[in-house]
Image: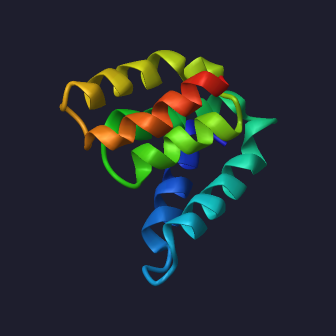
């Protein structure tokens, strides 16, 4: 699978996820999909998740933060650190978003 295809799969899954479902269910669903690829196609997962981190858009960016932490994607540290700076400087999201980003940075 090439990165664009994985990114398309993840984008489609987020877009088609039932709106009546909870955010926790969405996170679990996307993590389950990412888990299928992280061992065999780690670089593709990193590339797709990087795209979501750069988006600075909910829910994809924070889903990407979650995936980075769950699968210990240390390669994403620089992108996560940049996201944290943007959150702390008020350029992206509300200040409380810094907490999960810091937690993931501590994990990887």
Q: Quadrant of the N terminus?
A: top right
Residue under the point 57% across and 65% down: 24
Q: Picture quarter containing residue 97?
A: top left
Residue under the point 64% across and 64% down: 29
Relative to 30, 4 lies left or right: left
Nearest to the observer: residue 31 or residue 13: 31
Residue under the point 35% across and 53% down: 58
Give the vertical position of 98 relative to 82 (above or below). Answer: below
Nearest to the observer: residue 15 or residue 59: 59
Nearest to the observer: residue 9 or residue 35: 35
Q: Is residue 63 visible?
A: yes
Q: Quadrant of the C terminus?
A: top right
Residue 2 percent coordinates (x, y)? 61, 38
Residue under the point 46% across and 56% down: 11
Q: Is residue 4 visible?
A: no
Residue 32 percent coordinates (x, y)? 71, 57
In the image as oriented, which residue stretches furthest toward the bottom? 20
Relative to 4, 25 lies left or right: right
Give the vertical position of 12 relative to 83 (above or below). Answer: below
Residue 34 percent coordinates (x, y)? 67, 48
Give the vertical position of 108 relative to 31 (above or below). Answer: above
């Amino acid at each position: 699978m090439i990165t664009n295809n994985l990114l398309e799969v993840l984008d489609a899954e987020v877009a088609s996820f039932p709106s009546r479902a909870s955010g926790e269910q969405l996170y679990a669903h996307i993590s389950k999909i990412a888990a299928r690829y992280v061992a065999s196609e780690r670089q593709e997962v990193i590339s797709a998740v990087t795209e979501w981190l750069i988006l600075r858009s909910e829910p994809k960016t924070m889903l990407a933060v979650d995936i980075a932490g769950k699968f210990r994607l240390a390669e994403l540290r620089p992108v996560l650190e940049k996201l944290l700076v943007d959150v702390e400087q008020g350029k992206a999201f509300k200040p409380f978003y810094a907490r999960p980003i810091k937690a993931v940075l501590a994990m990887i």
